[in-house]
Image (cartoon, helix red, strand yellow):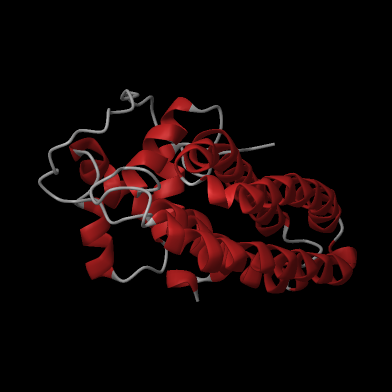
Amino acid sequence: MSRHLLSVGPTTIPALREELPSAPAVEPLPFAGLSLVHAAVRRDLARIPQALRLLQPDDHESALALKRHWDFVTAMVTCHHEQQDTRLWPLLRRFAPELRLLLNWLESDHHNLDQCFTRTTTLVGIATRDPASSWPVSYAVEELAARVETHLRIEERQLLPRMAGVFQPGSRIGTLPELLDLLRLADGPSASDALVWLLEGVDPVQIDRLLADCDDETVRHWPHWRDTYARCTDRLWGPAGQ
């Protein structure tokens, strides 16, 4: 399964930074990494069904591009769940023990969702090889999207507000820089792929604010990554994601 969208050279992997008592020059937007993943997953699960329905039997390039994008989304969801289950949830269990039952349910549901994505990946593979089956597969993706939406709403309504009372202002937990650092250390999607995927469709002013939280190398390469991603995805969604 392809986990990458862009062709990029090797990058330096920074060590995860320790939490420091002093505030950074630009305080990271709290939980922006988590919120951006949720928004990007919603966005793609909403538009992939239509892309499946539009597949033509002789358009092999579009089919391959769609399958590659689906594999990337699935890999990002898997990494997101792993990071929550192994890094974020243990911290919350320690410092907010009243959330343990909710966290146990969320972790269990992560496993259920991962299995749903695995089954749907098989169906998407069939549809991209044989567009005649794309309509029923598109319905399966829509059913998965509804299932995911329930999970995301529970996290956003019951967990995120409580997290604000657990982690101090300026903490990197759940921020975009932390997410990118974790991806650099993981065997999964690249940080460059993840960044352009996460920021697709985000208001330019907000993008500038989010990039202000990132390291200089990321900011320097951002225009190239953004433009390359646009060329890769124009075939799927049209220019500017239309």
User: Residue 146: horizontal and vertical position, in percent?
Assistant: 72, 70
Horizontally, is 175 left or right of 92 in the view? left
Q: Nearer the viewer, residue 180 or 236?
A: 180
Horizontally, is 88 left or right of 26 in the view? right
Q: Taking the image as drawn, is residue 48 in sight?
A: no
Which residue corresponds to the image point at 73% horizontal and 51% vertical from the top-left?
109
User: Residue 84: horizontal and vertical position, in percent?
Assistant: 54, 42
Say which quadrant the N terminus sits in.
top right
Image height of 188 relative to 75, above or below? above
Q: Taking the image as drawn, is residue 107 in sight?
A: yes
Q: Residue furthest left?
A: 25
Which residue corresponds to the image point at 17% horizontal and 36% vertical from the top-left?
21
Which residue corresponds to the image point at 38% horizontal and 54% vertical from the top-left?
31
Image height of 22 relative to 58, above or below? above
Q: Nearer the viewer, residue 163 or 142?
A: 163
State the count of labels: 0
User: Residue 178: horizontal and vertical position, in percent?
Assistant: 36, 40
Horizontally, is 29 left or right of 127 in the view? left
Horizontally, is 178 left or right of 92 in the view? left
Q: Residue furthest front?
A: 98
User: Residue 177: horizontal and vertical position, in percent?
Assistant: 32, 43
